Image (cartoon, rainbow, N blue to C red):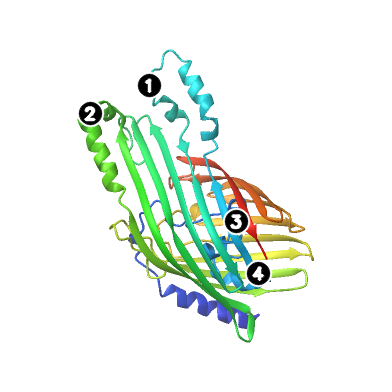
Amino acid sequence: MHQYTHYLVWIFLGQSLLKSDPLAAAAIRQIRPFFEDAFDLGAGGATLTWSTQESQLFNNPALLPYGGKLLRWLGGKTTLSPGTETLSISDTLQSSSSDSTSSNPIEPLFQTPVHLGASQAFSFISNNFGVAFFANAEPDLRAWRRGTPDSGGGTSQLHFRSESYGGAVASFAGRVQGADWLSFGLTAKQLYRLEVDQTLDIVSLGNTENLATLTQSLAQSAELGTGTAIDIGSLIFLQGKHLDWRIAAVQANAGGLRFSNGENSLPAMLHGGVGVSLHTAGDAIHLAADLKDIQGATNLPTYKRVYAGVKIMLRGILGLSAGVHHGHPSYGAAFDFFLFRLAGSVYTREYHDTPGVDARPITMFSFVTGTDF
């Protein structure tokens, strides 16, 4: 076991040399992967030691060599992730319209934030190489009666945020000769980003001149940016007859990720994870815990950097997952058939650094079609 510890120490020390300025991060997405899987999020988003299909390319490319078959996957995935409250907004609108004392069309947004999400990916994966093309969008709209939590008291405001990412990633990975329990991987990313984060004074919406100014401000903030970055992953995989241990370290955005439109960059971040699997020939239980951004480059609170969960796989067909995501319980399920896969999860995303201030319960569905050869 001493030799494993020796390798792990060198992995962390080497990757820590790529640390970036902690003040560099201010983007909405910050610590989250650019593409997420419903089943993985059901397990709290702990993905460094076990990820689903193309998620390995975005979380830890060093997972690729332990997939078994040489050619593992070719297919596409479509995901929808509306806010759980958004799914019931029709009830809120009906209640608001029946209230004769309220004629404010913004009123339902004070009670029910609107959160939508959609993503599409196409990927090819082998045991030492993978490539994926992806696009996603996640708009969010909420109204505050007396200013946002950050601005404090004041007039009623609308807070509009939108994250749109797309691009391509290519991953390469392999085991160390003479040490099959150790693997390294590298992911190169070409990204396109369009983010908007604007707060609008509701009173100003009634003034044509102010509305024109706000529209112009939104258009300027929605400038498309491009950027490239590299992730470096490592994995120690200690396999036993019925018990496996996994220890992962990932340097995300090595050297920092800067976008062409001058938007705030995403910093280099060091992630660490540990996982343990209990398995038979056809079933498996995997428990995992990840600590993202170990060095604190994003200045995010601890509850947003700790992810933990469990995945249960039964006969390679049915999967169940549960965990903790942003301090809230999460759960999910997946059904894997011959040429398609269905997955769903419920989890909570916290927009604010203080728990419970601006939370979004989200329901995610994904439909996957392709072949695992």
Q: Nearer the viewer, mark 1 or mark 4?
A: 4
Q: Residue 105, how many percent across, how many down?
A: 39, 24
Q: 56 or 303, which lies in front?
A: 56
Residue occupying the point 32% across, 39% down = 199
Which residue in the structure is indicated by mark 3?
Answer: 308
Residue 232: image location, x then y, percent? 48, 72
Circle 2 packing at 10 Å, graded few (<14), some (14-19), many (20+), is few
Which residue, given by chain and number where applicable, does mark 2 sit on?
208
Q: Earlier in the sequence, mark 1 or mark 4?
A: 4
Q: At numbered mark 4, what does the secondary structure look like: helix, strand or loop?
A: loop
Which residue reaches farthest right?
281
Considering only order in the chain, which callout, 2 or 1, is on the residue closer to the N terminus?
Answer: 1
Please tell me in which quadrant of the rendered image residue 165 appears: bottom left
Residue hosting label 4: 67
| Kind of residue indicated by mark 1 | Asn
For the residues labelled 3 and 4, the Cα–Cα distance comes to 22 Å
At horizontal 22% and vertical 28% (from top left) the residue drawn is 208
Left or right side of 212 for 44: right
Q: CA distance from mark 3 to mark 1?
A: 42 Å
Q: Residues within 10 Å of mark 1 (few under 14, many from 20)?
A: few
Q: Looking at the image, which residue is at 23% across and 35% down?
A: 212
Dot 4, crowdedness within 10 Å: few (<14), some or many (≥20)?
some
Which amino acid type is shown beneath numbered disc 3? Ala
Q: Looking at this rendering, what residue extends furthest in the bottom direction?
A: 178
Residue annotated with mark 1:
104
Q: Nearer the viewer, mark 3 or mark 1?
A: 1
Q: Are marks 1 and 2 in contact (CB under 8 Å)?
A: no
- N-term-proximal mark, 3 vs 1: 1
